[in-house]
Amino acid sequence: MKKKIIVKNLTKKFGDKVVLDNISFEVYENEVFVLMGGSGSGKSTTIKHIIGLLKPTSGQIIIDGVDITKLKKSELMEFRKKMGYLFQEGALFDSLKVWENVGFYYLENTKMPKKEIYLLAQKKLALVGLKGIEELYPSQLSGGMKKRVALARAIATDPQIVLYDEPSSGLDPVTTAVIDELILSLKRRLGVTSIVVTHDLQSAFYIADRIAMIHKGRIHAIGTPEEIKNNPDPVVQQFINRKPVGPITEDFIKNLENLDEIESKEHI
Ligand SMILES: Nc1ncnc2c1ncn2[C@@H]1O[C@H](COP(=O)(O)OP(=O)(O)O)[C@@H](O)[C@H]1O
Ligand SMILES: [Mg+2]
């Protein structure tokens, strides 16, 4: 299997804070690779490095054999065409119509006639199961539709790689299932390689070829859904069994104990 994305000894500090601590993993071509972990564990930071929005403090990001951390800005822009990115916040432009959102890359960066861009947007919208909403504005759409429009935009340039940051957060279970099927259909029909950040266990186990578990900026486990289920690491077990107490909530529990202590002192 061809290695499409290699993350090698990636460390990221914001000031003194180490957010990613020497993480390494590989994603194979045409794989759905799921990144799971608690809030603040470093998931979004990881995928922002892969799309080149953040520069590592140290380490390499190698995509199709190219270390993207070494690229000049213009080279990176060109390179990014092969990647689609679904932002955690969806991030549609409210002042642009749906078709303009989907065709944004072409409107901004090419001289393609508007009519063609409109048709292209229409096709991409059809791929995510949307029709007849080209002329609407984002404010006129439901949450699930917005996510799908954002997905249509993410795949507008026919990317070989799509990165999804919590594609189903805030969506109902049925819309979540629709998004899962879209991710799988892009893999099967277009051969896309995907990295999906999600805390939705059901989705993760359904769509993933492999899952990586990240905690406090470190990878704790990587494996197939079956391997992850059987992985004895306490972080993995707390996460997949949804236990309130464990390493993921260590700080939270400590703070609660401190609170108890403060309160008991107040009562003296
Ligand atoms: N630009 C930034 N500046 C400082 N700290 C940041 C920045 N971006 C993220 N962080 C911190 O890095 C940690 C990981 O964030 P993130 O990758 O967004 O986590 P998540 O796993 O929830 O996506 C958090 O503690 C967050 O506060
Ligand atoms: Mg995040």
Image (cartoon, grey):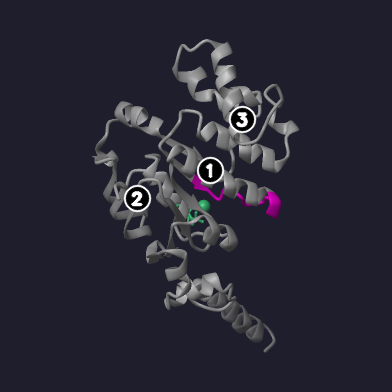
Asked whether residue 171 is drawn in magenta, I would say yes
Which mark lies nearer to you, 1 or 2? 1
Residue located at (46% from left, 69% from top) = 226
Amino acid carrying label 2: it is Tyr
Q: Which mark is residue 28?
A: 2
Alpha carbon separation for disc pair 3 and 2:
27 Å
Q: Which of the marked residues, 3 or 1, is nearer the chain's N terminus?
A: 3
Circle 1: element type: helix
Q: Which of the marked residues, 3 or 2, is nearer the chain's N terminus?
A: 2
Q: Tell me the residue that label 3 is attached to.
A: 125
Q: How many marks?
A: 3
Q: Which mark is residue 217?
A: none
- Magenta span: 164-174
Q: Residue 74: x and y, percent?
A: 32, 26
Q: Is residue 172 visible?
A: no
Task: Kindly tell me whether mark 1's CB lies below 8 Å from ligand 2.
Answer: no
Residue located at (44% from left, 46% from top) = 194
